[in-house]
Image (tube, rainbow, N blue to C red):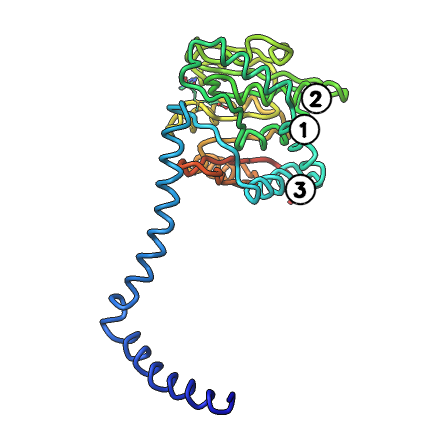
Amino acid sequence: MGARARPCAYARRVTTWPLRRRISVSRLAPIAAFPRRAARVARHDARVIADSARWLLTSREHHNYTYELTPNNLDHLAWYVAAVCDTPVSDVRAFVAEITSDESLREHIRAATAASARRGLADRQIRFGRRVGWYAIVRARKPPHVVESGVDKGLGTAVLAAALLRNAEEGSPGRVTAIDINPEAGYLVRGGTWSTVVDLVYADSVAVLAGLDRPVDVFLHDSDHSAEHERRELATVEPRLAPDALLLSDNVTTTSVLSQFAEKTGRHFLAFTERPARHWYPGDGIGAAWRGQR
Ligand SMILES: C[S@@+](CC[C@H](N)C(=O)[O-])C[C@H]1O[C@@H](n2cnc3c(N)ncnc32)[C@H](O)[C@@H]1O
């Protein structure tokens, strides 16, 4: 039986392979491959359309979208923070677990959102995305002074404040100066324990940075996302940085301002790119520049 099937399969291969080979080197090759290629891209696009449709129907957000990261992306984020902070990845994973299981912070954000004027444009589910990385960085480095430019609702500020409060419990207190040009920004950090370590400042970020009177240990750019503004913020904050300060940028998927700054000032640079789970938005990232052992 097997002995009879073998010559048959062999004969089939002999007759089809030369034809396929001849097509693959001819001008017909792209046409022959078209159905398979179209099916692949259609499968991908169908997933994006399904995620977009679900989001349109279930989310209320209209900017500064929130989402979870895919498990694989969260794992990459932990390794990224471990590299930037020169900290064992097991410690970073423990920090990630702290913030993802912080029910009192989630409850506070839910209540503050429900009481806010923008509640109609916010989701009930609290999702931190890349801010989990901000949390882990502040936990790992224990900075006395964090500066965040661009606050919006205050979701990132709340996450930074949660990290600073944990650091304080361990004997390393710190505060965050949170700057926004919009006086309505920051409603998530105007009350609750978290507000005790937050200094909200309402003005243009460059003007505020120019007037800072104590060294900056972690600087996070997340305000006006134009390259010029990011460049101006970095130039203004540079003389106010502590010697081992860490600079972060939320702009890293769209500009190379921080990597250029790192190169010019002799710092390391590393970028993390988000992969949102079940969301149409392609995600933002975290750029980091820091001095360290070569
Ligand atoms: C992307 S949001 C900040 C998001 C926030 N960091 C978070 O974690 O959700 C950008 C914010 O920057 C503020 N902004 C824009 N231009 C600014 C400027 N020149 N100075 C200070 N804040 C600015 C906007 O009002 C807006 O609230």
Label located before the other in sequence (2 or 3): 2
Instruction: Kindly identify which residue carries mark 2.
Output: 166
Give the spatial CA distance, label 2 vs label 3: 27 Å
Ligand 1 in which quarter: top left
Q: Position of residue 207 (x, y in %)?
A: 45, 14
Q: Are marks 2 and 1 in contact (CB under 8 Å)?
A: yes
Q: Position of residue 32 (x, y in %)?
A: 27, 68
Q: Is residue 94 above or below residue 189?
A: below
Instruction: Kindly identify which residue carries mark 3.
Output: 293
SS type, badge 3: loop
Badge 3 amino acid: Gln
SS type, badge 2: helix
Q: Residue at x 61, y 15 (%)?
A: 214
Nearer the observer, 185 or 149: 185
Instruction: Kindly identify which residue carries mark 1.
Output: 98
Quarter of the image holding residue 140? top right
Badge 2 amino acid: Arg
Quarter of the image holding residue 8? bottom left
